[in-house]
Image (spheres, rainbow, N blue to C red):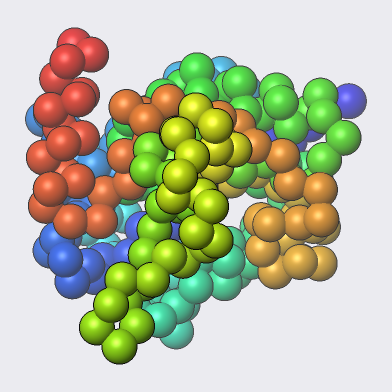
Amino acid sequence: MKNKIIAIIPARGGSKEIPRKNIRLMSGKPLIALSIEAALKSKCIDRVVVSTEDKEIAEISREYGAEIIERPEEFAKDESSTIDAILHALEVLRAENYNPDIIVLLQPTSPLRNAEDVGSAIELFLNSDCESVVSVCEVGHPPYWNFKIAEGYLKPLFRDKYLMLRRQDLEKVYMPNGAMYISTPENLRKYKSFYCLRTIPYIMPPERSIDIDNEVDFMLAELLMKSYV
């Protein structure tokens, strides 16, 4: 039997760093539209849902082909967690007698993640012995060379020996890039997170791993996107 796969895109109306970030135009389209299009073009997602409390975001999302789940204000505050919005969406879907097999979380702040990434990450999940897949990219600056400030002096965050090593001698380190998270409803309810005991990485290149949090991120993402056209 074919798996029922749904993409959920959480999009609050509030954004302190970049006002109305999720519908700000990037390369002529609202930011959220780029994630909706990536999901629809992947050809492996059955439904694309946007969870939002914002009427304008809802209207724009519908125009680009997404369904809307109205998010309660209690799950749309600055301190609200994404997982709460996802679990709420799952309950709404269950009340409609729709129970997906696989959940794909796509954050609208990752506009450079494309349809091929979405399809490949889902395929990785389906063909692996895992409970979840999280997209990551290699950390450019090795954390082993990081410092903290103690009593006004720089102190290595890790052991002194790492400061003597060349970059190529250090173990590669990866960080979540915010683009994709994949799991099942059962695991999400169990762990209250996409980070499970058996989480595997979907590795993405840095040029597609921009997670927009401020104006510099936005400008860089738009510049990179223009280079793909």
Q: Does residue 125 sit above or below 85 in this rendering?
A: above
Counting from the top left corner in percent of width and height, residue 15 is at 22, 67
Task: Estimate the x, y position of residue 98 in percent, counting from the top left.
Answer: 72, 50
Q: Residue at x 39, y 58 (%)?
A: 146
Name the residue: 70% across, 23% down: 123
Q: Is residue 158 visible?
A: yes
Q: Nearer the viewer, residue 79 or 67?
A: 79
Q: Quadrant of the C terminus?
A: top left
58 lies left or right of 40: left
Judged left or right of residue 139, residue 221 is left
| Residue 11 in which image quadrant | bottom left
- Residue 67 against residue 207 in the figure, above or below: below
Q: Where is residue 90? Give x, y as percent.
A: 66, 60
Q: Position of residue 67 (x, y in %)?
A: 45, 46
Question: Could you tell me if residue 73 is visible in this image?
Answer: no
Could you tell whether 144 is left or right of 92 in the image? left
User: Could you tell me which residue is drawn at 31 percent across and 39 percent down?
Assistant: 210
Nearest the eye: 189 or 208: 208
